[in-house]
Image: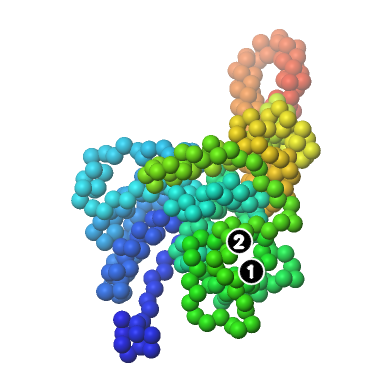
Amino acid sequence: KDSSMKRGYFQKSLVLVSRLPYVNLFQSLLQLIAPEYFDKLEPCLEAVCNEIDQWPPPVPGQTLNLPVMGVVIQVRIPSRVDKPGSSPPVMTHLDRLIRNNCVWSFLNCVSNLLPVTDRCFQPVLIHIQMLWELMLLGEPIVVMAPSPTVSSEMVLALTSCLAPLRYCCDYRPYFTIHDSEFKEYTTRTQAPPNIVVGVTNPFFIKTLQHWPHILRVGELRMSGDLPKQVKVKKLAKLKTLDTKPGRSFSPLRTRCLCLQGIQRKRPSEVQSALLRRHLLELTQSFIIPLEHYIASLMPLQRAITPWKNPPQIRPFRQEDFMKTLEHAGPQLTCVLKGDWLGLYRRFFKSPNFDGWYRQRHKEMTQKLEALHLEAICEAVRCGRRYQGQRRAIPSQAREEGEEGTAASEASWRRAGLCRWVGDGALCP
């Protein structure tokens, strides 16, 4: 506080910038650093940076002990093989000493952004099925929240609810009227982009009311004076989730049984684990038929020969995939009923499908190249072994067995393994 200032206080901020999306870790870290930094300023920050520079690189699936400011934060880096609700690894004797004498924080992150927690989704739990579908299709969504913290947590939770499927659209955890895309997002002359934005300013209630999906979390605070020409709806009339008709979106019909366990009065950790498991099973039921079909597009290994370029992956044909859903669709592993075919057709038009397909095609291409290189190496080894055996034959025996050697070389050629010219050099 500063009485000499017009507002009566001077606002300070400490911003942590990182390319790593470990939000929980960074929030815990700032809670430790910020009070000391505001008290001691640069010397404190310099000491903290020196300690962070000594941290080991993050490895998926590994538990790290990160010392900072006299305490140790223990964190496990999430990996793709993690299962929601799984128990943390058993602590060693050193871990117990760390926990007894220092701050211990185990971040049970399931996705690469923010864990889907009961705290984030509790106000909109009844709409969780529809929100999952909207995120799957990359639909434009506005999250209206009372504070930047709530806004950011909800947006990051939404983008992580598709795990292990990656959310490939744009998202802004905290969007303000000062952002450069403000005019683009508020214009009515074109459809909203595929993005999830989090806002706190009540001004957006009017300027973004043309967006197809609006999610309200908590009570918005009407602070400050709005322009007179802007008429804002009464907050009491705002729905928790407002999804306007007229778009090609029809949610699947869900049974209440799948979320009964979440609705009971249980600890928050248990609630979060149940919710993560439900969303994971939902995503897996949807993505497994796609994985099975794209795996069938992979050429057979016997088609890979060292004398030709690697075979091409067959193209993804949507109609051929649709034919497989009757006997191998998500209805076999999911309790939801509805228009799965329509959901897949809309998914094919979304950036999420494009991102998934590009990644899988890249992985399959790399696999083909590795198998092709392995075939070439095997042919070279066979050629060298045959060449060594040929040179070991005495000259007299070679003359006597010339006819048999020629026949052997011919059989090797027919097998497509190697070709000999001149003094026996291997040629492609």
Residue 311 vertical position relative to residue 219 in the rendered view, above or below: above
Residue 189 vertical position relative to residue 139 in the rendered view, above or below: below
Question: Which quadrant is the N terminus positioned in?
Answer: bottom left
* Residues under numbered marks 1 and 2 in contact, where contact means CB atoms less than 8 Å apart: yes
In depth, the one of 184 and 420 nearer the eye is: 184
Query: Where does residue 363 sit, x and y in percent of width and height?
Result: 62, 41
> Looking at the image, which residue is at 58% across and 60% down?
239
Query: Where does residue 334 sit, x and y in percent of width and height?
Result: 60, 34
Which residue has dot 2 on it?
A: 214
Q: Which callout, 1 or 2, points at the residue further toward the start of the chain?
A: 1
Query: Where does residue 216 sit, x and y in percent of width and height?
Result: 54, 61
- Name the element at disc 1: loop
Which residue has dot 1 on it?
A: 208
Question: Which quadrant is the C terminus positioned in?
Answer: top right
- At label 1, counting other C-alpha atoms closer than 10 Å, the crowd grade (few under 14, some 14-19, many 20 or more) is some
Query: Which residue type carries mark 2?
Result: Ile
- Horizontal side of residue 420 vs 80, given as left or right: right
- On the image, which quarter does residue 412 sit in? top right
